[in-house]
């Protein structure tokens, strides 16, 4: 199985596609640009979803659900929003088909044209703020902290599994507040939630910052983001949180009666992460042997493989394997005992290694005699023989070590591939090598656009942590307030 994988260093893009499809995460569907998420891939997404959902609820948010279809007129109410999404919208114009004129096939029934065309949800700000107008009358109704788990459609022309598809899964939070500061605090809080999830669950180190005006979400006053570095040196936006000001409240006339008995517009945020995180997970840790999954998100954390020659050996090994399985499960470790008699141990070893299972335990007749098992780590590919006694505690400790090791390895990679430059020639040299290039920028959209045109690199974020020393723009030579992070990106 692993031999079928393109080498990561030869063709990173093909390696990624091979890995996603051959590890049974997802595949292309009959609908161009759309994907089928397979059970193993969906199990990982469910782990992500459950962890994030708890984090949202722990910070006071509730889940709701809003329509998939949005009246076209809603999009015209917030000018920058419609401009940002107009080219990606799928539009419903009719509600019925009929038999073709030759009695075969089907055609659109022109008598069933909608009075108002509907947009298939690319994001839900408009439908939600139209709804919030009915929910919010007084300061007593605020803050309103709502999240929804949904699918969205953005008609992408160039697609790649998980990273960019015409339809994808995500969550989108939409909150309403009485004051500007409360809304800003909310947007920043959710950025911290995303960063905590990425680092503690995905073992993915991220940078926190704000987007430049050119890269902001359509309709936002400020866009906060987390950015990660993939193993090919490209950046990936892993999550965004937007301070929307009063733009949508004014567009949809959402007012509240303040404590001072005055009618005021509410302040808004929106924030979201999507199945793009699956792509980030694959690209940040995996290798030429297949997937490498952090234990916290692995659907199977430990796989037990029996090695035997006859039914008698299998019976004795199974008894011990099931005993170990139960011990591990009592520690809330997700375990699979692979007792298939249709595949040999070598095939099973390769298969589970390819699927990124963090720990593999092998038990053979000699292990039964010696009271031992062979344990293999997926992250380092190291094997060791351990005593069966206390194997549950040892496995738990190893899973914690693997989680930490994956994060540290990714952090070390990012540090080695982050370059501070002073001149344009240095910038050009480093951007070709990949990684984050940290340079001064004069703050103008014109300079940002010229750098993008000449190098295909964009400002990934303006950091909100660390030093903010003034300097000289790497491109224009004009004064700069601080350094920003550039990279080529997905």
Image: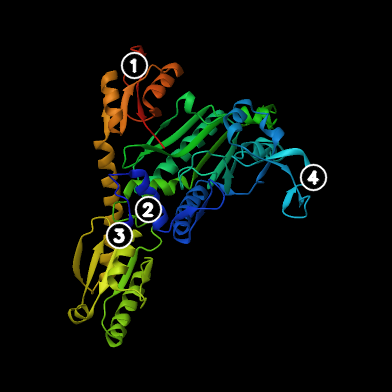
Measured Cα–Cα span from mark 3 to mark 2? 23 Å
| Alpha carbon separation for disc pair 1 and 2 | 40 Å
* Mark 3–mark 4 distance (CA, rounded to whole Å): 58 Å
Which label was assigned to residue 112? 4
Q: Give above or below for 456 relative to 31.
A: above
Q: Nearer the viewer, residue 10 or 60?
A: 10
What is the spatial separation of the Cα atoms under label 1 and label 3, in whole angstroms?
46 Å
Depth-wise, is mark 4 or mark 1 nearer the camera? Answer: 4
**Observer-nearest of 341 and 314:** 341
Q: Is residue 311 left or right of residue 176?
A: left
Tell me residue 80's x, y (percent).
59, 26
Q: Residue at x 55, y 42 (%)?
A: 173
Q: Quadrant of the C terminus?
A: top left
Which of discs 3 and 4 lies nearer the camera? The answer is 4
Residue in the image at 33% along x and 59% along y: 354
Pick whichever of labels 1 and 2 is earlier in the sequence: 2
Q: Which residue is mark 2?
A: 19
Q: Is 39 placed left or right of 431 in the picture? A: right
State yes or no: discs 1 and 2 in contact (Cβ < 8 Å). Answer: no
Dot 3 corresponds to which residue?
399
Residue 246 appears in view = no
Which residue is at the far bottom? 312
Q: Earlier in the sequence, mark 3 or mark 4?
A: 4
Residue depth check, mark 1 versus mark 3: number of the one nearer the observer: 1
Label 4 or label 2, whichever comes before in sequence order: 2
Residue shown at the point (33%, 64%) measured from the top left: 351
Task: Identify the mark nearer the N-term, 4 or 1.
Answer: 4
Q: Position of residue 216 (x, y in %)?
A: 50, 29
Front one among 62 and 274: 274
Crowd around label 2: few <14 · some 14–19 · many ≥20 (10 Å): many
Residue 74 location (% of width, % of height):
69, 34
């Amino acid at each position: 199985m692993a031999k079928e994988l393109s080498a990561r260093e030869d063709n990173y893009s093909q390696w990624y596609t091979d890995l996603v499809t051959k590890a049974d995460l997802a595949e292309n569907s009959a609908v161009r640009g759309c994907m089928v998420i397979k059970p193993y891939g969906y199990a990982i997404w469910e782990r992500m979803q459950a962890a994030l959902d708890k984090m949202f609820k722990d910070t006071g948010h509730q889940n709701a659900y809003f329509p998939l279809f949005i009246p076209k007129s809603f999009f015209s109410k917030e000018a920058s929003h419609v401009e940002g999404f107009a080219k990606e919208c799928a539009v419903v114009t009719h509600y019925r088909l009929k038999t073709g004129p030759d009695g075969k096939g089907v055609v659109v029934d022109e008598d069933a044209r909608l009075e108002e065309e509907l947009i298939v949800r690319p994001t839900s700000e408009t439908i939600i703020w139209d709804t919030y107008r009915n929910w919010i009358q007084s300061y007593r109704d605020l803050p309103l902290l709502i999240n929804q788990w949904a699918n969205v459609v953005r008609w992408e022309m160039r697609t790649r599994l998980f990273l960019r598809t015409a339809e994808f899964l995500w969550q989108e939070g939409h909150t309403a507040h009485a004051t500007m500061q409360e809304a800003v605090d909310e947007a920043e809080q959710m950025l911290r939630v995303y960063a905590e999830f990425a680092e503690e669950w995905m073992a993915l180190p991220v940078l926190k910052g704000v987007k430049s005006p050119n890269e902001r979400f359509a309709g936002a006053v400020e866009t906060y983001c987390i950015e990660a570095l993939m193993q090919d040196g490209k950046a990936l936006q892993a999550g965004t949180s937007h301070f929307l000001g009063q733009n949508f409240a004014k567009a949809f006339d959402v007012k509240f009666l303040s404590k001072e008995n005055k009618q005021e517009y509410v302040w808004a945020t929106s924030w979201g992460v999507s199945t793009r995180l699956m792509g980030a997970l694959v690209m940040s840790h995996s290798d030429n042997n297949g997937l490498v999954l952090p234990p916290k998100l692995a659907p199977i954390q430990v796989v037990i493989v029996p090695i035997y020659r006859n039914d008698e050996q299998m019976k004795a090994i199974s008894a011990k394997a099931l005993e170990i399985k139960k011990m591990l499960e009592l520690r809330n470790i997700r375990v699979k005992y692979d007792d298939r008699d249709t595949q040999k141990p070598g095939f099973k070893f390769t298969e589970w290694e390819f699927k990124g299972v963090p720990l593999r335990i092998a038990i053979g007749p000699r292990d039964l005699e010696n009271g031992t098992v062979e344990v293999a780590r997926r992250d380092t590919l190291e094997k060791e023989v351990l005593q069966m006694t206390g194997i549950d505690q040892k496995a738990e400790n190893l899973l914690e070590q693997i989680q930490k090791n994956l994060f540290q390895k990714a952090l070390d990679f990012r540090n080695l591939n982050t370059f501070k430059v002073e001149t344009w020639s240095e910038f050009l040299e480093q951007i070709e090598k990949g990684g984050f290039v940290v340079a001064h920028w004069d703050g103008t959209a014109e300079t940002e656009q010229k750098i993008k045109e000449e190098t295909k690199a964009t400002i990934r974020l303006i950091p909100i942590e660390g030093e903010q020393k003034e300097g000289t723009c790497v491109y224009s030579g004009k004064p700069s307030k601080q350094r920003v992070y550039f990279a080529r990106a997905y």
